[in-house]
Amino acid sequence: DIQMTQSPSSLSASVGDRVTITCRASQDIKKYLVWIQQKPGKAPKSLIYAASTLQSGVPSKFSGSGSGTDFTLIISGLQPEDFATYYCQQYYSYPLTFGGGTKVDI
Amino acid sequence: EVHLLQSGGGLVQPGGSLRLSCAASGLTVSINSMNWVRQAPGKGLEWVSVLHSGGNPDYADSVKGRFTISRDNSRNTVYLQLSNLRTDDTAVYFCTGGVLDWGQGTVVSVSS
């Protein structure tokens, strides 16, 4: 199985901040990576797929980069609605695997 | 626009069974890989099962032999049959269409 390691596991930020979350895969997954946002009590929402392609309707303050084993999610100009937990997920091979999550709070 | 409407779930005793449903609109289940993902209370996301477009299923080791995924093309619906449930199966279960679309989730609680 491919292991996905996210860092940090949590971070505190302020409105307007630029936030960076990293995700590392235990083997080469090309660009088969999704970034997912989950707010408390809500269903997850996929933000970015293929490592860097924004899902329709997702604001451009979210950006993703990377390929192979190292990936980054950047949130520019953090807003109150962005405080959530973010997960990376590989879909290069089954079983699908997720990072442990990064909780972004104030 | 894709909608995945989930139903089923509830409270069941250990050893019991449940069936979860995921009715799709805006997406055809027979030509997409449909997954089930779960989230135990306070925990992260865990992949459970997939039904590929060709009809072949796959399961996480933790549920293999106990859960069965299937679909009804005429209803454009995917199912997850949960059997021989254990307390550690307690979670919110989400269906997903490919990697982009998520259902609203349904709670499965296994307790005596």
Image: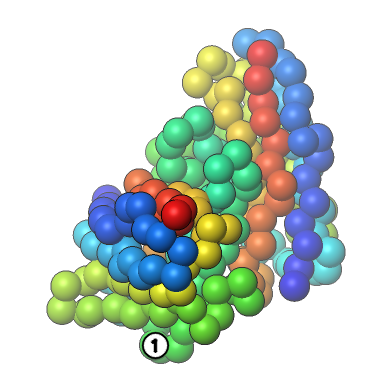
Q: Position of residue B44 (x, y in %)?
A: 63, 47
Q: To which quarter of the image does residue A76 belong?
A: top right
Q: Nearer the viewer, residue A3 or B53?
A: A3
Q: Nearer the viewer, residue A72 or B111?
A: B111
Q: Which residue is drawn at 22% across and 79% down?
A: B73
Task: Using the rendered image of the protein, determine whether residue A55 is visible from the camera's viewpoint.
Answer: no
Q: Is B59 placed above or below A10 here?
A: below
State left or right for residue B5 relative to residue B110.
left
Q: Is A11 placed above or below B44 here?
A: above
Residue, far front: B112
Residue, far left: B74
State left or right for residue B35 relative to residue A24.
left
Q: Position of residue A3 (x, y in %)?
A: 78, 62
Q: Which amino acid does label 1 sit on?
A: Gly
Which residue in the protein does label 1 denote?
A: B55
Chain hosting mark 1: B
Q: Position of residue B54 (x, y in %)?
A: 40, 88
Q: To which quarter of the image does residue A43 belong?
A: top left
In the picture, the quarter occupied by the C terminus of chain B is bottom left
Q: Residue at x 60, y 39 (%)?
A: B42
Q: Nearer the viewer, residue A80 or A70?
A: A80
Q: Residue at x 71, y 16 (%)?
A: A13
Q: What element carries label 1?
A: loop
Q: Position of residue A21 (x, y in %)?
A: 75, 36
Mark 1: few/some/many CA within 10 Å (<14, 14-19, 20+): some
Q: To which quarter of the image does residue B51 belong?
A: bottom left
Task: Using the rendered image of the protein, determine whether residue B15 is visible from the camera's viewpoint.
Answer: yes
